[in-house]
Image: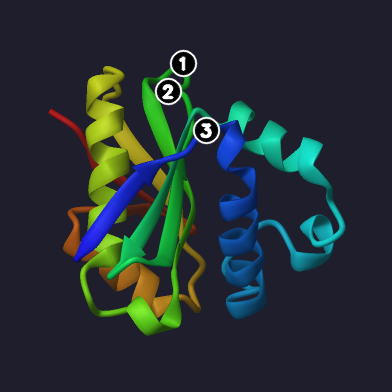
Amino acid sequence: MIDLRVLTADDWAAWRELRLASLRDAPDAFGATLADWVREGEPRWRQRLTDVPFNVLAELDGTPAGMVSGTEPDAGQAVELISMWVAPSARGRGVGDELIGAVVGWAQRRGARRVVLRVYDHNRHGANLYRRNGFRPIGGTWMTLPLT
């Protein structure tokens, strides 16, 4: 069973645990690095969860299994899906689809026109996940999902 939990700044320790795991597991999948975050204390982790307005943690059978965030819509009414990661033990079990769905639903409620994301060329599995959820390449490493 997959459960999603929208996080607040008070959930910083749970977010920290998953974010550091993601940076260890897939260092080439993110703009940030483990070195950027590993020594940071509670104030910076809380600030991250405050600065980015939508943060979700997924649990699979009661165990933390993934995470994702969404930015505030920009001037073009686009929400950026960021910090997406699914734990290796949870891959192929629908966690990624649920996390993407959470951001897309939140973006729609915020009145966004589209969701955009960046996926690096070497991340074939991630690109396939996003394509399966309706995202299409728009140039370089960027993909988009129009919302109607």
Q: Position of residue 90 (x, y in %)?
A: 34, 77
The outermost residue toward the left is: 148
Inspect the image, locate mark 2, and give the three-letter code of the amino acid beneath it: Pro
Q: Residue at x 33, y 66 (%)?
A: 62
Give the amino acid type for the residue marked by disc 3 in the picture.
Thr
Q: Which residue is mark 3?
A: 8
**Looking at the image, is mark 1 or mark 3 earlier in the sequence?**
3
Nearer to us of marks 1 and 3 is 3
Q: Mark 1 highlights which residue? A: 75
Q: Residue at x 47, y 38 (%)?
A: 7
Q: CA distance from mark 1 to mark 3?
A: 25 Å
Quadrant in which the N terminus is drawn: bottom left
Instruction: Tell me which residue sits at (31%, 50%) in the image.
Output: 4
Can you tell which of label 2 and label 1 is closer to the viewer?
2
| Tag 2–tag 3 contact (CB < 8 Å) | no
Amino acid type of the residue tagged 1 in the rendering:
Ala
Label for residue 42?
none
Q: Position of residue 76 (x, y in %)?
A: 40, 20
Residue 130 seen anywhere in this rendered image of the structure: no
Give the SS element for disc 2: loop
User: Which numbered dot is residue 73?
Assistant: 2
User: Between disc 2 and disc 3, whose residue precedes?
Assistant: 3
Helix, strand or loop for disc 1: loop
| Rendered position, 24 above or below 33 | below
